[in-house]
């Protein structure tokens, strides 16, 4: 590139050739290359923000889960009077030397549709919460008869919610309306069992509720064990917080795939009730006196859901840590089904494209 040019001028009365500086410049091709490189850099920088936001959400949720689990454990250990728990081993309901099943503590929940035990926007009654837990904890005694016992209510909404306060009605909003002001809420649920030695083991399940979600309650009207063997939702009852269901399943080995699957004989929708990624707690054998090692207390994660007959519903669920559980022997699991789908409830069951609200189980 030339940087100077000559011109004719006069110096000392005579004509001479002189030179002056010429301005440097980029060509159009060079400018276009620079703009292209700048654009690539901006795109790379912009791509970092969604990843950072996703990692921030995951970190925030993980911290909330840890906090809730510690809160649940602390309250469970300090507020629960073990003498008020149902102890089927000590009372001789179960055979000597057998661990009891995992059972749930009663919990209050918001009514969102006016059915069940309250009007829209209210918390269900203490009696209703206890009755649901009492039904869900039913067992067969040593004589094969159904046995239940009322379980005390130890915790209220303010104890179990992540925001640390119970949504209550205000001048312009119901309690449910106040609850909806929070975009994401975490809640913990208490479970316990009595071991063969008479010791109480405890567990906490941490769940998520997102604004707008509603959850189904398990229908117990058919009586035990029919509601456990054929799990269906209570017609028309919608709850704001997740609801635990107790379901009877068997472990089946598929020769064609070489995998073990959990199957519920009473429903072809188990994979929708317990979707991929959801965590499940094994409650124990469906019937006492099996004489087999009890898998109670094991947490399993659903890895796959299989539509075996092509009807659009997933009948089988697969997990990695069930191969040692005897096949064709019924045992119970605790699950938290997903929220209602925006388009309703296909097949009369709970279904959602999202994941299970159960995020983590902690046993202690």
Image: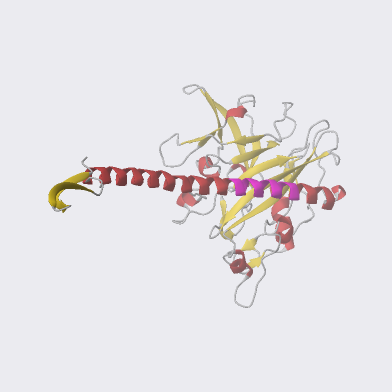
On the image, the x and y values in percent for residue 249 come to 60, 36
Q: From the viewer's side, name the closer residue of 336 and 309.
A: 336
Above or below for 173 versus 342: below
Above or below for 110 versus 317: below
Above or below for 154 versus 144: below
Which residue sits at x=35%, y=46%?
A: 38
In magenta stretch: residue 66: yes
Which residue sits at x=46%, y=45%?
A: 48
Quadrant in the rendering for residue 260: top right
Of the 4 image quadrants, the one containing the N terminus is: top left
Which residue sits at x=58%, y=48%?
A: 357
Left or right position of 303 against 312: right
Of the 4 image quadrants, the one containing the C terminus is: top right
Q: Extreme bottom residue here?
A: 171
On the image, the x and y values in percent for residue 150 come to 78, 53
User: Which stretch is magenta?
Assistant: 59-71
On the image, the x and y values in percent for residue 218 come to 61, 51
In magenta stretch: residue 237: no
């Amino acid at each position: 590139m030339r940087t100077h040019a000559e011109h004719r001028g006069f110096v000392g009365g005579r004509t001479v050739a002189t030179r002056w500086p010429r301005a440097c410049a980029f060509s159009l091709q060079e400018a276009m290359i620079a703009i292209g490189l700048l654009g690539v850099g901006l795109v790379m920088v912009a791509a970092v923000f969604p990843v950072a936001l996703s990692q921030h959400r995951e970190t925030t949720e993980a911290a909330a889960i840890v906090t809730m689990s510690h809160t649940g454990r602390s309250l469970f250990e300090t507020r629960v009077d073990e003498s008020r728990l149902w102890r089927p081993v000590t009372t001789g309901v179960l055979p000597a030397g057998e661990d009891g099943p995992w059972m749930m503590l009663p919990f209050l929940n918001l009514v969102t549709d006016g059915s069940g035990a309250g009007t829209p926007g209210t918390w269900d009654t203490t009696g209703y919460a206890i009755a649901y837990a009492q039904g869900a904890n039913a067992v067969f005694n040593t004589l094969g008869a159904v046995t239940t016992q009322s379980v005390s209510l130890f915790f209220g909404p303010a104890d179990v919610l992540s925001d640390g306060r119970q949504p209550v009605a205000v001048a312009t909003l119901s309690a449910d309306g106040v609850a909806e002001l929070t975009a994401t809420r975490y809640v913990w649920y208490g479970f316990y069992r009595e071991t063969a030695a008479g010791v109480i083991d405890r567990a906490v399940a941490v769940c998520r509720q997102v604004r707008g979600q509603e959850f189904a309650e398990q229908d117990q009207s058919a009586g035990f064990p029919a509601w456990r063997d054929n799990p269906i939702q209570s017609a028309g009852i919608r709850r704001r917080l997740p609801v635990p269901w107790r379901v009877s399943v068997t472990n089946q080995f598929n020769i064609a795939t070489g995998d073990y699957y959990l199957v519920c004989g009473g429903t072809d929708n188990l994979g929708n009730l317990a979707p991929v990624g959801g965590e499940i707690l094994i409650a124990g054998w469906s019937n006492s006196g099996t004489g087999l090692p009890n898998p109670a207390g094991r947490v399993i994660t659903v890895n796959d859901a299989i539509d075996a007959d092509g009807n659009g519903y997933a009948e089988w669920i697969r997990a990695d840590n069930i191969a040692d559980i005897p096949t064709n022997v019924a045992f119970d699991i605790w699950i938290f089904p997903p929220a209602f789908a925006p388009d309703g409830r296909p097949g009369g069951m709970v279904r959602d494209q999202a994941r299970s609200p159960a995020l983590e189980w902690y046993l202690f």
